[in-house]
Image (cartoon, rainbow, N blue to C red):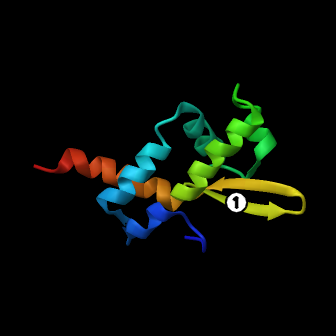
């Protein structure tokens, strides 16, 4: 995981989330447009403007949603010249999937 990762990652050790970390990540993923952004940034880093084109939201709203995803640790911001590029932290996403899967396995 990268330096400066979101606060949800404080609860992530050895790819296992604590309850508070999982709650924050699930809240971040609770909005459809945020999930679209996370999926779009899985295969390649994307500029904020490119992500805005995937949504009907105003650019200012897209920026706020990207901030929520960054704070949670789901997206990582990389500055490339004048561009802000976003990529999904796949380790964090995997940890969410593992935590949800574990819910179904508990007695």
- Point out the residue furthest to the right here: 82
Image x and y of residue 76, in percent: 64, 60
Helix, strand or loop status at disc 1: strand
- Point out the residue furthest to the top here: 56
Instruction: Looking at the picture, tell me which residue is in the foreground, 62 or 83.
Output: 62
Image x and y of residue 72, in percent: 51, 56
* Residue under the point 60% across and 56% down: 70
Instruction: Looking at the picture, tell me which residue is in the foreground, 99 or 20.
Output: 20
Task: Give neighbour class at mark 1: few <14, some 14-19, many 20+ (Cα, 10 Å).
Answer: many
* Residue under the point 38% across and 72% down: 13
- Point out the residue furthest to the left here: 107
Q: Which residue is mark 1?
A: 77
Instruction: Looking at the picture, tell me which residue is in the foreground, 59 or 32.
Output: 59
Image x and y of residue 101, in percent: 30, 48
* Residue under the point 32% across and 53% down: 99
* Residue under the point 76% across and 55% down: 85
Up-down: is 58 above or below 69? above
Up-down: is 57 above or below 9? above
Q: Is 92 positioned to the left or the right of 97 in the image?
A: right
Q: Is 90 positioned to the left or the right of 22 in the image?
A: right
């Amino acid at each position: 995981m990268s330096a400066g990762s979101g606060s949800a990652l404080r609860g992530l050790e050895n790819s296992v989330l604590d309850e508070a970390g999982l709650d924050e990540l699930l809240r971040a993923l609770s909005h459809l447009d945020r999930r679209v952004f996370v999926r779009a940034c899985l295969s390649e880093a994307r500029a904020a403007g490119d992500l805005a084109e995937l949504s009907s939201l105003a650019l200012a709203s897209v920026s706020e949603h990207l901030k929520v995803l960054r704070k949670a640790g789901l997206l990582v911001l990389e500055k490339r010249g004048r561009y802000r590029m976003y990529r999904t932290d796949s380790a964090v996403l995997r940890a969410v999937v593992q935590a949800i899967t574990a819910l179904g396995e508990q007695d």
